[in-house]
Amino acid sequence: MTKKHLTIKELTDTVGGGTTPRMVRHYHSLGLLPQPVRSQGNYRLYNQQDVQRLQRIVALKQQGFQLNHIQQILESEPEAEIGSNLTAQLQQQYRNVMQQIAQLRQTASALEGLLGRDRDCQIMQAEVLAQLKLLEVETQTGFDGLETLWNRLDAQVDAHPEVFGESLQCLLPELLERSEIERDVISQLVLACGDVSLVNFIRVSRGAIASCRGALKSGCDVVVDIPTVAAALDQTRLMHLGCRTQVLIDDRHVTTVTEAENAFWRSPQWRQKLSQISANSILIVGYAPSVLLAICEAIQNQQIQPALVIGMPIGFSHAPAAKRRLMQLSSPYMTIQGTLGGGLLAATALNSLVESLIAKPDCHCHLNC
């Protein structure tokens, strides 16, 4: 039987998400949460409506919305469209966030330029770090001196090829909970886009790597959304495994995400072709989010049973939604949360898995993750 009233501690324990009584009291002061009824001992008492309201606040906050925008969203009528004033405020918040990201990206680039040096650059790096501590940057002379230091550091890159493995060791976060094969896939994806922060958005379902390796060993079909993705696959290794590549939207004129989306919606033959995919195939979506949505629907309706779905389409509304839907299924998947993705990253993921299978056919490290 559900308890009629909850104390503030019971409320935060029920909602979870890192909420604390102090946060709840702050939400009361802002008007985000209505003032609760009081017990005879003057303790705050909460009901199920309060639980639901706080859950919405926490969910919106985790999505990155500011508290003043959360209040406006919660107070608007559910049936009403978002007002132009709120839309303008959210657009301004987006611009502010993007400016912060740009500033942080600049800082990250400077740190990567120092920390991502391989062994042959370490001596010069140590010298530059020592001189940075003494550098006066308040004057134009100081800025010139900083540029000179960077030029000296950059001069070392002409003496030898870059050793990417050593650079990644300095920059990648700890991935001890991931298998060796999964760590290799992540490393290859980071190298493919040059963005270490991608690690935070890569999602691999439990058992996905084992399912993929089993399918590749059996010479499965590899089905991609458009020809551009097929062109980026390691066809030599796939042929060695006896795997055949199929293109869903088999039109060489379709090369962009816009063309892929329009082609999929314009021609019902592509949807029909999707329903005819053989069981135990590996499906790769690098461009069209609608293709991934259709794949999810087909899996949910038990029309297809892929061994792995590599879902990394591009887009700002459909793509994140398609990836969320993919992650809700029980079918094995590999994806990148949010808007990030693309055909090169999708192909890189499979190429890495294929290479690891050929190089280490008897590796079982992935079975423990």
Image: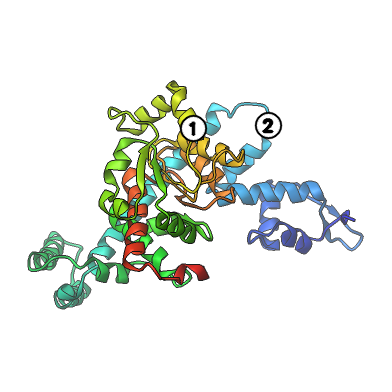
Q: Is residue 171 left or right of residue 264?
A: left
Task: Name the one closer to the observer, 19 or 146.
Answer: 19
Q: Secondary structure at mark 1?
A: helix
Which residue is denoted by mark 2 in the rendering?
78
Please provide percent x and percent y for residue 247. Answer: 36, 36
Residue located farthest toward the right when viewing the structure as drawn? 40
| Residue 54 against residue 355 in the figure, above or below | above
281 above or below 88? below
Q: Is 344 situated left or right of 69 in this image?
A: left
What's under tag 2, amino acid-wise?
Pro
The amino acid on which the numbered mark 1 sits, given as a three-letter code, is: Ala
Work out which quarter of the rendered image holds the N terminus and state it: bottom right
Residue that label 1 marks: 88
Whether residue 272 can be seen here: yes
Eye-nearest disc, 1 or 2 = 2
User: Is 148 drawn above or below residue 32 in the view shown?
Assistant: below
